[in-house]
Image: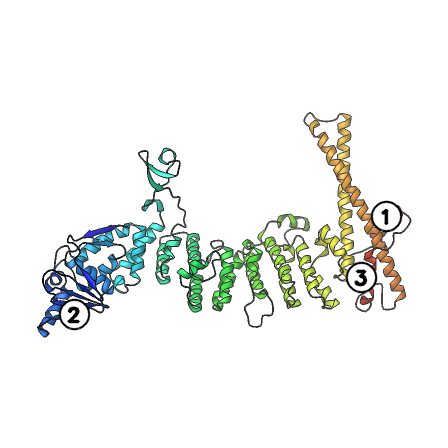
Amino acid sequence: MACLKLGSKPDAFHRQGLAWFCPTGLPSDVTVEAGEMSFHLHKFPLLSKSILLEKLIAEQCKEEEEGCFIKLPDIPGDSKSFELVAKFCYGVKLELTASNVVSLRCAAEFLQMTEEVAEGNLISQTETFINQVVLLSWKDSLKALQTCEDLLPYAEDLNIVKQCIESLAVKACKDPNLFGWPMMEHGSMQSPGGSVLWNGISTGARTRICSSDWWYEDVSSLSFPTYKRVIAAMESRGIKQEVIAGSLTCYAKRYIHGLNKRQNTSNATLDTAPSEEKQRNLLEEIDRLLPFQKGVTSTKFLCNLLRFALILKASSTCVSNLESRIGMQLSDAALEDLLMPTFSYSMETLYDVDCIQRILEHFLAMDQEIGGASPDLVDDEQLIGSLSLTPITTVAKLIDGFLAEVASDVNLKLPKFQSLAAAVPEYARPLDDGLYRAIDIYLKAHPWISESEREQLCRLMDCQKLSLEACTHAAQNERLPLRVIVQVLFFEQLQLRTSIAGCFLVSDNLDGGSRALRSGHVGPTEGGGWAISMKDNQILKVGMNHMRMRVSELEKECSTIRQEIERLGQGRSGWTVDPKKFGFKLKLLMCSAKEDSVNGHQRSKSEKIERLHAKLPRHKRSTSISIEK
């Protein structure tokens, strides 16, 4: 920290309790009371420097002949600043620094220590030091601005606050290496230990690489009103919105207790945690200052800010703004960011599902405004490829993960679960595996819901969009309704048939290529790929064999299920066979097309059929199953 030395006399002041004395061989003839301290001084040194003290001494001497007693209750800086003023008047050595120059400048102005009284008076000395030393340094400007907060409105009237703020804003918008820090050097200018070299000699200074966030911690030490003015000055100079958002994030983590997870207990004791009301007001102010622009603020920070806004019961405007900000960049969020506990008195659910649904609605509205993907523009085959990496597909996967997390909550009502799941557009999910997992968890955690509610819940997913692994799991899932299990079996068989047909087509092409290779009709550059083609052909054949076995098993199971349904339909009058009850076209030929090629004997009934027997009686009044031939 830079300093300026004033005066030449040795310090003769000494303190006794709450009194200061300056022994010069002459008895004290004036007593000045400033703050809690009293100063026993002499008239002449004070008269020669201050117009105000000259007037006060003249007035007091007329009224009191024996002694002169002066009170200065309003002097800026109280007794500490007047102590330095008294030393200056006596010519005692003292140092001007960024920590005391503002209080001395304000006290000098208050005491009218101008050039009219004495040349090189305190006003001119402090003014010169501020302009030529303090304002040229980042650290000194920041320290001076911090001291201004205790000297208002004097420092404001003298324009010191504005000067310090402008100095900080200018430096924050430019290269930090130009303001008193060692610049990054390379080659021979840097020692092996990393210190800066001057003429081959180590200076001991370490090189420092500064990024745009180098000033965040420094300005966060300011009070929020002063901090806001610094941020406003930086914005007026065109600083990037990302930098402003980063500074606000740093400030919030420092003063909103618990927002910074890395903050340890020792830091919390050093910085006294403000009251809940002050934290709520600070959070609302930070929300107003944050740039309302996508991507400039971390999604994780916005979610944490929203979580604390709910805890501190911030205004509805603040909560709505944060939800809108998160909705704009929901595709960048992680699942843990959305798990916001419910802080209402009712405590219906563990996590706030309504809040997440509002955030999703903001995202969908924004996606529609910017012209997001529409299912009317692409067919089914193009849809999966084009949406695999789009933001809305990422959000759909995120919401499915959130549904799976909250599905185990026994207090989560079915309409609320359905509403959030249905809010995601159907075209946003290339696969419904995540939604199926969430539905399965919900059914497991809510075994008391009726069969009609189970079927209503399962309508949220499309069995045609389940992967083979999900189909295999669903076909053996006892919690699913019978209708869904049959649909899953059908589409699993359909997928396997399609895959086998594709494998046959590839196999025929590879066989033709291998025959061409064996016959010698191969181009000069194609001979090297013969071994690779043969290897791929073998791998495909092995895969086809496995698929054939799986299809055979599914055909047998489907045939057995059909026979059981027909037998039960003939034996029970409550069952009807209506070929148009299924939502898809299921034909007997799909289940029996290859029955003649299968071994003549029937396998014993599998565990799946036993579970089917257990389920069928429960459906005799509510379910009507039919098979279209």
C-alpha gap between disc 1 and disc 3: 24 Å
From the image, state whether disc 1 or disc 3 is nearer to you.
1
Q: Earlier in the sequence, mark 2 or mark 1?
A: 2
Per the image, the residue denoted by label 2 is: 70
Residue at 47% x, 68% y is: 315
For the residues labelled 2 and 1, say whether their Cβ atoms are less than 8 Å apart: no
C-alpha gap between disc 2 and disc 1: 115 Å
Q: Mark number for residue 580?
A: 3
Res 175 seen here: no
Residue at 71% x, 32% y is: 532
Per the image, the residue denoted by label 1 is: 594
Quarter where residue 158 is shown: bottom left
Where residue 3 appears, as percent x and y from the top left, is 24, 51
Q: Amino acid at mark 2?
A: Ile
Is 310 situated left or right of 410 in this image? Answer: left
Residue at 10% x, 65% y is: 27
Q: Quick one: label 2, few (<14), some, or many (20+) residues within 10 Å?
A: some
Q: Earlier in the sequence, mark 1 or mark 3?
A: 3
Q: Is 426 located above or below residue 535 in the figure?
A: below
Q: Amino acid at mark 3?
A: Lys
Q: Quick one: label 3, few (<14), some, or many (20+) residues within 10 Å?
A: some
C-alpha gap between disc 3 and disc 2: 106 Å
Secondary structure under tag 3 reads loop
From the image, state whether disc 2 or disc 1 is nearer to you.
2
User: Considering the image in quadrants, where does the C terminus appear?
Assistant: bottom right
Q: Amino acid at mark 1?
A: Lys
Count of marks, rendered view: 3
Where residue 346 appears, as percent x and y from the top left, is 58, 72
